[in-house]
C-alpha cells in the first residue's frame, strides 16, 4: 500500500500541536501550585539566662583581649560587646594616659595608670559576693563593684561588707535595664538616683564615682546624665564573657593572657551561676598580683 505524503504531514502537524498544548497546560498547572514552605533556621528558647552584661544582639565583631576582631559576642551585654553605634570596645593599650576616655561615647576603658582594675557586676549576691570578697581579702586586692540597685536594696549587709573592705562602689542601674540609655534623660536620671539612694541607704555618704551601663549599651544621653550626676561612665578592656559561663579555666586564661598595664577587667558576682568566676579567681588573683599592681579604681576620696 502506498502512503499519501500529505496525510502523513497532516498527522505530524496535529501531533506537534497536541504536544504543545499539553506542555502549556502542565506549565500552567505548576504555576498555580504554591511552593512548599521552607524550614526556618531560627530557634527560640523557653528559658533565658538571668540578667548579666550580655551585649545587645547584633553581629558586630568585638575585640578580643589582644585587640583583634573576634567572632563571638563580648558584655554585655553581658556588659561586654559593641556599643549601639557599632563601635567595638577597644583593646588594651600600653601605657594608658590618665583620664583615658576612648570607649563608646567617651566612656573610660582603662584605669588611666599602670594599675590593673578588677570590676564585678550585677551584685551583690548572697551566694557569690561573699566568696569573691573572701578571695580578694586573702590576696589583699581591692576591686570595684558595679551594683544593681534592687540587689543593693535586698542585701544592704553585702553593700556594707564591700565598703568595709575598701572596695570602690559603682552604679549599675536599678534593675539591669539594657535599654536604659534609650529612655528619656529624666527617666535615666531617676533610675540612677534611685540606685545611688539604695547604695547609700546601706552606706550613708558612700562615694559612687562610676556608672556602668548594663550590656555596654551606651548612648550619648546615658553618658551625659551619669556625668551630670558626678559619675564617670565606665566601660572595660578585657571581657572573658564569664556571664556566658564558659568555665573557670577559660575565664582565667582569657584574663591572665589579656591583661596589660591599665586594663579594666569585666567580671560578674551575680546575675546567674557565677561559681565559674569564683573558681577562676583562684588562678587570676595570684597571677595578676605577681605581675601587676591590682587595685580598685579611685573613688575620689584619696
Image (cartoon, rainbow, N blue to C red):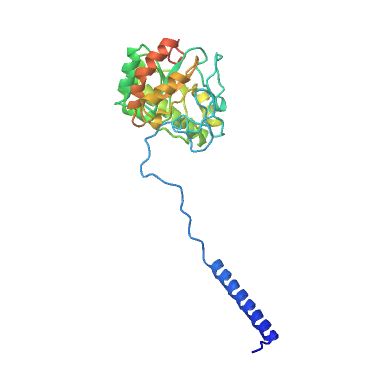
Residue 115 place in picture, x, y as percent: 47, 13
Between residue 149 and residue 3, name the one nearer to us: 3
Residue 260 place in picture, x, y as percent: 49, 16
Residue 269 place in picture, x, y as percent: 36, 25
Q: Residue furthest right?
A: 6
Q: Quadrant of residue 283?
A: top left
Q: Quadrant of residue 101?
A: top right
Between residue 206 and residue 289, name the one nearer to us: 289
Q: Is residue 4 above or below residue 101?
A: below
Would residue 146 be seen by someone viewing this image from the given angle? no
Q: Residue furthest front?
A: 1
In which quadrant will I find the C terminus?
top left
Q: Is residue 5 left or right of residue 194?
A: right
Would residue 151 be seen by someone viewing this image from the given angle? yes
Total label count?
0
Q: Is residue 284 left or right of residue 95?
A: left
In which quadrant will I find the N terminus?
bottom right
Residue drawn where x is 61% and y is 78% of the image: 18
Residue 46 place in picture, x, y as percent: 36, 45
Residue drawn where x is 44% and y is 27% of the image: 193
Q: Residue furthest bottom?
A: 1
Amino acid at each position: 500500500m502506498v502512503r499519501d505524503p500529505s496525510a502523513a504531514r497532516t498527522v505530524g502537524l496535529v501531533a506537534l500541536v497536541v504536544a504543545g498544548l499539553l506542555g502549556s497546560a502542565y506549565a500552567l498547572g505548576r504555576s498555580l501550585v504554591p511552593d512548599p514552605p521552607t524550614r526556618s533556621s531560627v530557634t527560640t528558647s523557653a528559658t533565658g539566662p538571668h540578667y548579666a552584661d550580655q551585649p545587645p544582639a547584633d553581629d558586630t565583631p568585638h575585640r578580643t583581649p589582644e585587640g583583634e576582631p573576634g567572632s563571638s559576642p563580648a558584655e554585655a551585654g553581658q556588659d561586654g560587646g559593641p556599643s549601639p553605634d557599632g563601635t567595638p570596645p577597644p583593646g588594651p593599650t600600653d601605657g594608658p594616659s590618665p583620664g583615658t576616655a576612648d570607649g563608646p561615647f567617651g566612656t573610660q576603658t582603662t584605669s588611666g595608670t599602670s594599675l590593673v582594675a578588677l570590676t564585678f557586676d550585677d551584685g551583690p549576691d548572697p551566694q557569690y559576693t561573699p566568696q569573691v570578697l573572701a578571695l580578694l581579702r586573702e590576696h589583699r586586692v581591692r576591686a570595684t563593684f558595679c551594683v544593681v540597685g534592687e540587689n543593693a536594696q535586698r542585701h544592704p549587709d553585702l553593700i556594707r561588707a564591700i565598703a568595709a573592705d575598701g572596695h570602690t562602689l559603682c552604679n549599675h542601674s536599678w534593675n539591669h535595664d539594657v535599654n536604659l540609655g534609650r529612655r528619656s534623660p529624666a527617666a535615666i536620671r531617676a533610675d540612677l538616683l534611685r540606685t545611688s539612694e539604695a547604695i547609700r541607704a546601706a552606706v550613708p555618704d558612700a562615694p559612687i564615682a562610676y556608672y556602668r551601663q548594663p550590656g555596654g549599651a551606651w548612648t550619648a544621653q546615658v553618658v551625659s546624665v551619669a556625668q551630670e550626676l558626678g559619675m564617670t561612665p565606665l566601660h572595660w578592656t578585657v571581657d572573658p564573657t564569664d556571664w556566658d559561663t564558659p568555665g573557670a579555666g577559660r575565664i582565667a586564661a582569657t584574663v591572665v593572657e589579656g591583661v596589660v598595664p591599665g586594663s579594666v577587667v569585666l567580671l560578674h558576682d551575680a546575675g546567674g551561676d557565677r561559681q565559674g568566676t569564683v573558681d577562676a579567681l583562684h588562678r587570676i588573683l595570684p597571677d595578676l598580683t605577681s605581675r601587676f599592681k591590682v587595685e580598685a579604681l579611685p573613688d575620689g576620696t584619696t
